[in-house]
Amino acid sequence: MQVLALDFDGVISDSAREAFSVAVQTYSSLRPGSALQETDELYAGFVELMPLGNRAEDYAVILAALEQKAVIADQAEYDAFYRQQDRGQLTVFHERFYQARTSWAERDPDGWRRMLAPYPEMLDILHRRASEVTLAIATAKDRFSVAMLLRDYGIESLFREDLVLDKETGVTKRSHLALLQKSLQVPFDAITFIDDKVNHLDHVAGLGVRCGLAAWGYNGGREWEAALRAGHLVLHLQDLEAQLFG
């Protein structure tokens, strides 16, 4: 392994509560008739469906499914429900979501940051291993948020600025990793990519990268089994270094 590429949310940052809060606010502003509230019950349902989506627009799909009490047990059922949604409305939601997030971060930076704690064990591992591999980030998050949080977490210096690939760099993780390979001029099989979503790993596996599911992120037994069936590693923080570095 020469390169360790990491998703951000669910791998470095425990961001589900923040994403949930911004998503509900954005959803309610676009659908004034919605009765959804930021309750623990709604949050539990939100997190249960998070692994099946890819981008911010999926939060609107998830909230619509929860509001309509749609039964979604797996990726196929989620994809079918997604196709029923209005594409124009999803695009507007996607844009408004990031506007709302940036507005919150600028208006109340301390309150916003309190919603985005890192995984401490992951930070320790990155500090210990940074001299052994090239570290990169491949995320659907916006650069503004990523840069601010990397500073807060004390790991900004571990990542070259040009190796922090955000939502503007490419729509998919596959495009991120293709750009990363081209930039670093290493074989794809020298890159290990860690994400907390199986569908992201499935999408990049064809490139030849080694894929690992972050089991500490937003997933559970359903995703662990799917990852193993697809030939991906299922990684746990307590033995992550042994699994990756031997």
Image (spheres, rainbow, N blue to C red):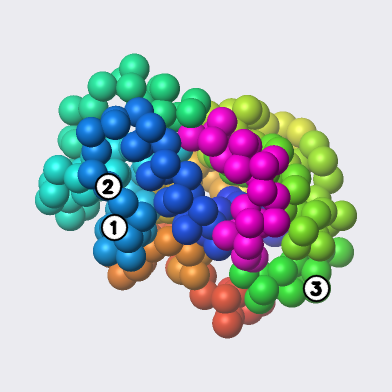
Structural distance between the alpha carbons of marks 2 and 3: 43 Å
Q: Amino acid at mark 2?
A: Leu
Task: Give the farthest residue toward the bottom.
Answer: 238
Residue carrying label 2 = 36
Mark 1 vs mark 2: which is more N-terminal? Answer: 2
Sequence-wise, which precedes: disc 1 or disc 3? 1
Q: Is residue 96 left or right of residue 151?
A: left
Which residue is at 75% across, 54% downward? 150
Q: Residues within 10 Å of mark 2 (few under 14, many from 20)?
A: some
Residue drawn 66% across and 70% down?
Answer: 122
Determine whether the residue tagged by mark 2 lies in a helix, strand or loop. loop
Other residues around mark 1 within 10 Å, as few (<14) / some (14–19) / many (≥20): some
Q: Is residue 100 magenta?
A: yes
Element assignment for label 1: helix
Decide if residue 101 is on the left or right side of residue 245: left
Q: Is residue 20 magenta?
A: no
Q: Is residue 194 left or right of residue 125?
A: left
Q: Quadrant of the C terminus?
A: bottom right
Q: Specify the segment rendered in magenta.
A: 97-118
Which residue was labeled with disc 1? 42
On screen, residue 136 versus residue 38, left or right, reads right
| First in sequence: mark 2 vs mark 3 | 2
> Where residue 78 appears, x then y in whole percent?
23, 43
Q: Nearer the viewer, residue 17 or 4?
A: 17
Magenta: main secondary structure equals helix
Q: Is residue 49 above or below residue 65?
A: below
The amino acid type, in three-letter code, at marker 1 is Leu
Q: Quadrant of residue 142?
A: top right
How far separated are the C-alphas under marks 1 and 2? 8 Å
Residue tagged 3? 128
